Image (cartoon, grey):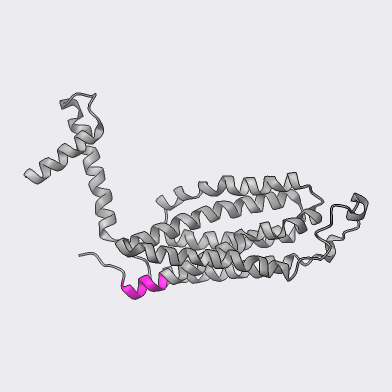
Amino acid sequence: MSETNSKQHKWALTLILAFCSFAYGLNYTLLGQTVDELQRILHSSAAKMSYVFTMKSAVYCCDAWIFQYTNRQLIHGINCLIISVFTVITATFPNYAIVLCSQSVIGFAAGGIDVATSVLVLEMWESSANMYLQCVFLGYTFGATLSPLISNAFINENSIIPNNISNSSAAIYDPNESKILLPYTITASVAFIAFVLIYFFEICEPYKTPERSISRKNTNQEINGNISETATLVKKKLPNSYYARSNVINLYRN
């Protein structure tokens, strides 16, 4: 009989995932809170800054496939590390291309965190996963709520300039006076702590994939194999579900 994860292990991993979601929400929403400050630092327009948000969202769905080929928990931690590093890069280098690329990488990692979190919670808690899944993503809500409170404490008062001020007045703004690096460093530190927690927890207490998930995958492969072997014995116009159903019936008869 295969080993299973203890309830204490499930609770510990769930709490770590909740903290990772908190760090994820804290960093992912920070760009929206500081976009005016970044726009002034980069001497950019609102139209160009919108491309940053577009690219960040576009690559969000590109990270999920990685989990099919490697350890899901370790990649989850690496994604937290990626968010931490590129959050600091965003505020450290006042260059539009760097900000665009770094935020795109953050969007890529964020998609992986969402997928891994959902799969892990559903796999661990089975039928009672709804409550735990909601609690984990509540961490994201807390992070997204705290993010503007952190950024507003450091945003330069001159970053938001009224519409009636001329462009010549806006040009006086000195990027060196900005304190935008401080909120980005704070939120990035939280993401780094999340990386350390989940990474070393996985090394010290490895997560064991439930046997049902492995057996279900093997069963699906066997059914697909049987379908391909018997497909020539029946009419091709029948749907694939017919073959699968026939195999299930034969298993019960045997």
- Residue 66's x, y, as percent? 46, 50
- Residue 93's x, y, as percent? 75, 57
Figure quadrant of residue 38? bottom right
Left or right: 64, with 230 as reference point: right
Left or right: 11, with 230 as reference point: right
Residue nearest the viewer, comparing 225 with 48? 48
Q: Which residues are magenta?
A: 6-13
Residue nearest the viewer, comparing 209 with 203? 209
Say whether residue 98 is magenta: no
Query: The N terminus lies in which quarter of the figure?
Result: bottom left
Query: The C terminus lies in which quarter of the figure?
Result: top left
In the displayed orientation, state which residue is furthest to the front: 164
Regarding residue 199, the answer to whether it shows in the image is no
Q: Residue at x 51, y 69 (%)?
A: 19
Q: Residue at x 57, y 66 (%)?
A: 143
Regarding residue 206, the answer to whether it shows in the image is yes
In the displayed orientation, state which residue is furthest to the bottom: 8
- Residue 145's x, y, as percent? 60, 66
